[in-house]
Amino acid sequence: MTYSIKATIRGWWAPEHRLTCPAILWRQIVSELHRRGERWHEAGAFLLGVEKNGRREVRSAVYYDDLDSNAYSTGVCVLYGDAFSELWGRCRAERLTVVADVHTHPDTGFQSHADKTNPMVARAGHVAIILPDFARWPIRESRMGVYEYQGQHEWINRSPDRAQNFFYTGFWS
């Protein structure tokens, strides 16, 4: 019963959001990225969840350095094939899919050339989130980047200042 009430309120409160993450989980992910980045290098995670009716719901996260202990050794996030094998295995075991990825940058959440040309999941519809200031809380939405992959190294900017109803991190997610 509680779930149906929550779903009904979510439909009213956040009807157009295509990517959602509960506020408590989002805060945990951001805090963990900040900790893993040690305030001086990038850190990242895959956001696992489910897709329903065009909406992606985050349920958990898998951090890059849990998949590859050398993921941050260059100062930026780099993963190799074995890490992805581990990731897909976890998705199968948990019956979830990658709904987005998130990583940190030292300044604003802009999409670098490397980010644009090397998507973590090169599948149309994949969402990449970039957090500013190595994920130091609080994160101002105006400095966060949210990008949706279209294929062929083309992206749509879905950042909160351009697409306010795309990404929701609140109680009703």
Image (cartoon, rainbow, N blue to C red):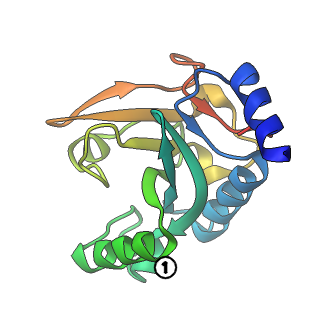
Q: Which amino acid does label 1 sit on?
A: Asp
Query: Is 65 positioned to the left or the right of 38 in the image?
Result: left
Q: Is mark 1 on a helix, strand or loop?
A: helix
Residue shown at the point (30%, 71%) measured from the top left: 84
- The percent coordinates of residue 41 (x first, y second) are 50, 63
Depicted 143 relative to depicted 96: above or below: above
- The percent coordinates of residue 13 (x first, y second) are 75, 22
Residue shown at the point (31%, 69%) measured from the top left: 79
Residue shown at the point (34%, 25%) measured from the top left: 156
Q: Nearer the viewer, residue 152 or 4?
A: 4
Quadrant (top left, top right, bottom left, bottom right) of the N terminus: top right
The residue labelled by disc 1 is 66
State the residue lying farthest toward the left.
Answer: 152
Q: Which of 61 and 52 is in front in this view?
A: 52
Query: Is 137 positioned to the left or the right of 127 in the image?
Result: right
Quadrant assignment, res 59: bottom right
Quadrant assignment, res 87: bottom left
Residue 104 visible to an observer of this rendering: no
- The percent coordinates of residue 161 (x first, y second) are 57, 18
